[in-house]
Image (cartoon, helix red, strand yellow):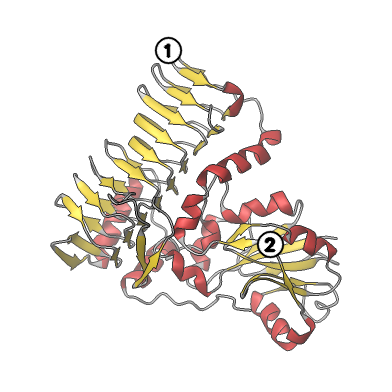
């Protein structure tokens, strides 16, 4: 039976702030693939639509041109599965969907994991329509949607995504491996060391310089197209390095580094979404870093307390026990750090912050557009923030789009709206 999957956001998207200020949660990544692309592993051949908040949908459509955004087009005879974008483990959900004979709501405890619309429920819904038609149909026929418990699980906070890095990279690598093609123009210089080569995949145009180490003994390593791994760099799997990135002297362990990053120093069990610049020495661990963040030399975060107790994070003003001893930093888009900046354990830093002056940033949660340090913050003006963003992006041969600039304006003015989330 053909299937259309619609990934949606619910009200819990805000629990992933600041990472979800300008993107839906299902765009985030633990491994090689963004969360929503993992669906193909469990529902092969299904078509995918993306359902997002109204304010982020134009920028999302610009970033994900291969997927319809806030528009659902289904083939004749296709069922439609609305799938919570926070999905973490699919559990028995694929089998339940396959066996379902009537429209069904799949629950994990009191949370909705997905809602399946069978073809009989869709008789009054056009084949090309916006998501709100489905939510109205659900409200009108709710009594006909039985609840069914599933073993599938959901992410609840950003540190859940970070905690899955190692197993997510390994699972994505195993899924992608049958699709790997023999690369071309790969240069491994004499004096470079590759360990457990059978667990390493290079895409086209990769260069590994003398003295570099790529060690997949503890997990697979995927190196994207045109990556440059310079001398005295060490990569330990499981690890993903995205296309057009540069790995400089230092050590990367069990991390997911997106495309067009520059990474030096030490990085451990972290996600750099894309376009992150950490050129110099310093440590970032157990963290999720959004695009266009720049770390000045020796910027370092804490990811472990001296007494080894669980780390508490502050999210939207609420202090939460993460249940983990290892939690680092969660950093919003376009934030910058001056040399010698030290980041408190479990800190959340908003979009377009500029922190400088050295010393320890003791805050637990920073709002967007903050300029200064723990001793004193000023509001970073929108014009200055956009000017900095444009200059940084031009250095990577890209431009700040009108859609992203508008999103940053809404963030600065505190006008981000949740309109467009789906609560079943």
Find residue 31 and report its horizontal and vertical position in percent.
54, 45
- In the rendered view, would you say 305 is above or below 154? above
Residue sitting at x 69%, y 35%? 179
Question: Between tags 2 and 1, which lies in front?
Answer: 2
Q: Is residue 272 left or right of residue 383?
A: right
Say which residue label 1 marks.
191
Q: In this view, does 222 lie to the left or right of 143?
A: left
**In which quarter of the view is residue 196 placed?**
top right
- In the rendered view, would you say 347 is above or below 244? below
Find residue 216 and report its horizontal and vertical position in percent.
53, 28
Q: Residues within 10 Å of mark 1 (few under 14, many from 20)?
A: few
Figure quadrant of the N terminus: bottom right
Question: How far, Cα to Cα, is label 2 from label 1?
Answer: 49 Å
Q: Which mark is residue 44?
A: none
Please tell me which of labels 2 and 1 falls first in the chain: 2
Q: Is mark 1 on a helix, strand or loop?
A: loop
Find residue 111 and report its horizontal and vertical position in percent.
61, 73
Q: Is residue 17 left or right of residue 84?
A: left
Residue sitting at x 52%, y 51%? 29
**In which quarter of the view is residue 209 placed?**
top left
Residue sitting at x 53%, y 33%? 225
- In the rendered view, would you say 24 is above or below 182? below
């Amino acid at each position: 039976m053909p299937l259309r999957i619609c990934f949606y956001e619910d009200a819990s998207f805000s629990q992933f702030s600041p990472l979800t200020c300008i993107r839906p949660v299902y765009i985030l990544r633990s491994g090689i693939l963004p969360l929503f692309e993992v669906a193909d592993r469990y529902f092969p051949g299904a078509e995918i639509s993306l359902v997002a908040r109204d304010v982020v949908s134009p920028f999302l459509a610009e970033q994900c041109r291969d997927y319809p955004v806030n528009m659902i087009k289904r083939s004749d005879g296709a069922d439609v599965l609305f799938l919570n974008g926070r999905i973490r483990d699919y559990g028995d959900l694929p089998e339940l969907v396959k066996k379902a004979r009537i429209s069904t709501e799949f629950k994990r405890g009191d949370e909705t994991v997905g809602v399946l619309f069978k073809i009989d429920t869709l008789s009054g819904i056009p084949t090309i329509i916006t998501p709100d038609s489905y939510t109205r149909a659900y409200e009108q026929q709710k009594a006909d949607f039985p609840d069914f418990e599933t073993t599938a699980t959901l992410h609840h906070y950003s540190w859940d995504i970070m905690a899955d890095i190692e197993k997510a990279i390994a699972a994505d690598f195993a899924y992608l491996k049958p699709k790997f093609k023999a690369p071309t123009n790969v240069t491994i210089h004499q004096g470079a060391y590759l360990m457990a080569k059978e667990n390493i995949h290079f895409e086209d145009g990769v260069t590994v310089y003398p003295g570099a180490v790529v060690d997949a003994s503890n997990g697979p390593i995927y190196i994207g197209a045109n990556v440059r791994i310079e001398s005295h760099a060490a990569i330990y799997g499981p690890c993903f390095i995205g296309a057009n990135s540069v790995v400089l002297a230092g050590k990367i362990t069990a991390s997911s580094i997106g495309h067009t990053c520059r990474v030096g120093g030490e990085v451990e069990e972290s996600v750099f979404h894309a376009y992150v610049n950490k050129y110099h020495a310093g440590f970032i661990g157990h963290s999720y870093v959004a695009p266009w963040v720049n770390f000045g030399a020796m910027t370092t975060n804490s990811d472990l307390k001296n007494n080894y107790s669980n780390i508490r994070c502050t999210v939207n003003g609420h202090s939460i026990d993460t249940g983990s001893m290892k939690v680092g930093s969660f950093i919003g888009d376009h934030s910058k750090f001056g040399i010698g900046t030290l980041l408190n354990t479990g800190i959340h830093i908003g979009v377009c912050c500029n922190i400088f002056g050295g010393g320890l940033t003791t805050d637990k949660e920073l709002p967007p557009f903050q300029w200064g340090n723990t001793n004193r913050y000023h509001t970073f003006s929108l014009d200055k923030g956009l000017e900095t963003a444009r200059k940084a992006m031009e250095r990577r041969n890209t431009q700040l789009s009108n859609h992203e600039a508008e999103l940053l304006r809404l963030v600065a003015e505190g006008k981000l709206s949740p309109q467009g989330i789906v609560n079943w």
